[in-house]
Amino acid sequence: MTVTTHTVIGAGIGMTMGNPILGFFLGFVSHLLVDMIPHGDHNLAEQYKVYKKKKKIALAYVGLDASIALFALLILFNVIDYQNKVAFSAAIAGSILPDILIGLYEITKTKYLRWFNSLHFFFHDFFVKKHGDVKLSHAIVGQAGLIAILINLIN
């Protein structure tokens, strides 16, 4: 899923949780579970690892996604009247932490994050390896619709 999707799901969790620790944990777990849904980026990740020319496309995709996630987060913080800012923020942090850890692993290749990389891709590729992925363009449209619905529900 896009970071934007994970951010908005985390925001929804944070709105319903009064406890920051529980919100963080549920945000983290939600990331792994939602990543099980085929979402069109399997080939993008593979191309990044194998083809040097495709790295620019993958990095542009990630940069654009992170920028949109930041924009969505700013909207959520300024439009929504939420009671517990710490739980809200903790759930969002938990929901995007897995992708941050994967990025750190890709940069460092540290043995300390290897286990998490394997765990993350176990979830990420769970259905894709068995049934194939969807087209990235379809996934983006679907996630944009999901984000719009979630923001409407949160608001």
Image (cartoon, rainbow, N blue to C red):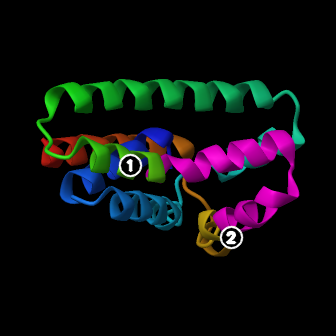
Mark on residue 129?
A: 2
Q: Rounded to the nearest whole Å, what is the CA distance between mark 2 and mark 1?
A: 32 Å
Does residue 11 appear in the picture of this structure? Answer: yes
Query: Which amino acid, mark 1?
Result: Ala
Residue 32, given in percent of the width and then of the height, sits at 52, 64
Q: Give the magenta part as a residue range.
A: 95-121
Relative to 118, is 90 on the left or the right?
left
Mark on residue 33?
A: none
Residue 4, given in percent of the width and then of the height, sits at 43, 39
For the residue carrying disc 2, how many other residues have a C-alpha within 10 Å: few (<14), some (14-19), or many (20+)? Answer: few
Q: Nearer the viewer, residue 51 or 3?
A: 3
Mark on residue 90?
A: 1
In this rendering, is residue 86 above or below 61? below
Q: Look at the numbered disc 1 and give the secondary structure of its residue.
A: helix
Residue 110, given in percent of the width and then of the height, sits at 86, 52
Relative to 12, is 138 on the left or the right?
right
Give the residue drawn at x 21%, y 58%: 18
Residues at circles 2 and 1 in contact by the CB criterion of under 8 Å = no
Residue 57, given in percent of the width and then of the height, sits at 70, 27
Give the residue drawn at x 15%, y 35%: 80
Outermost residue toward the bottom? Answer: 130
Tell me, yes or no, whether the highlighted magenta stretch contains residue 116: yes
In this rendering, is residue 8 above or below 27? above
Dot 2 or dot 1, earlier in sequence:
1
Give the residue drawn at x 70%, y 42%: 103
Q: Look at the numbered disc 2 and give the secondary structure of its residue.
A: helix
Q: Nearer the viewer, residue 111 or 142?
A: 111
Query: Which amino acid, mark 2?
Result: Lys
In this rendering, is residue 83 above or below 74? below
